[in-house]
Amino acid sequence: MITPASSFQPLIPVIAIDGPSASGKGTVAQRVAEALGFHYLDSGALYRVVAFATYQRNIDWHDANAVAECAKILQINFKNERVLLNGSDISNEIRSEAMGKGASQVAVHAPLRAALVALQHRFRQPPGLLADGRDMGTVIFPDAMLKVFLTASTEVRAQRRYQQLLGKNESASYENILADLQERDARDKGRSSAPLVMADDAILLETDNLSISDAVNVVLTHFQHKINNKSHK
Ligand code: DC
């Protein structure tokens, strides 16, 4: 009998970093992945691609089945930090505020979430995976070696997003950004399918007063402890 590759996957370590929008987790996650030479899964990008593709095809973001069916036929690839949809680079398009909002809207649908599970599991490759999202530690990789819930106050997150947009010369209003973040938080936390929630066995990392490099070091230190504890067993 041929043993499916997936049966070896639990041996491959996963670090799951979950948290709300604009918490800085993407940057922290990427740097931790780089430091360890791990693969990186930006699961939010998958939901953003689905929002973009359904928008292009005039599919209603409220139509759970149509959104999921559309997602099943998409060819999504990550190449050198770029996101490709059916071969076209759509990295810039999916980073817009509108697609962030759309991603949060399509992500409430259980059939879509189910359609994206296998794709996310395929990122678990040697020597390890850093998975970034909302349900990495709770649903997609519940056996992750280390789970981190990275967050910051809504005001600090809105301020960071505001500065980011100004840095890109995009017009922005702090009040609108704050309201959008509150709306997205409420939707991501309130949905019935895989809501944003801290896993029972996750480490809470509050970044209001923590720099990116400090946050990276905290995650790396926790991971090192996990490795040491495992090798002493
Ligand atoms: O991390 P991000 O801002 O790119 O995510 C965009 C939206 O996608 C987020 O508001 C909710 C959804 N999402 C999700 O439901 N589950 C994930 N694992 C990642 C993102």
Image (tube, rainbow, N blue to C red):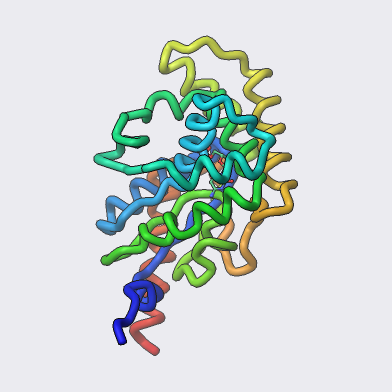
Q: Quadrant location of the C terminus?
A: bottom left
Q: Quadrant location of the N terminus?
A: bottom left
Locate residue 142 relative to residue 88 in the image: left or right: right
Give above or below for 149 relative to 84: below
Give above or below for 201 relative to 185: below
Residue 205 visible at all: no
Name the image quarter holding residue 230.
Answer: bottom left
Q: Viewer-proximal residue, 147 or 213?
A: 147
Q: Viewer-proximal residue, 135 or 203?
A: 135
Give above or below for 105 relative to 15: above
Name the image quarter holding residue 4.
Answer: bottom left
Q: Residue at x 29, y 34 (%)?
A: 87
Q: Residue at x 37, y 42 (%)?
A: 75
Locate residue 101 relative to residue 40 in the image: left or right: right
Q: Viewer-proximal residue, 122 or 39?
A: 122
Locate residue 103 relative to residue 63 in the image: left or right: left
Residue 96 percent across, percent down from the top left = 49, 24
Q: Quadrant of ligand 1?
A: top right
Locate residue 176 relative to residue 123 in the image: left or right: right
Residue 226 percent across, percent down from the top left = 41, 73
Q: Viewer-proximal residue, 54 or 11?
A: 54
Q: Residue at x 63, y 23 (%)?
A: 177
Give above or below for 222 relative to 205: below
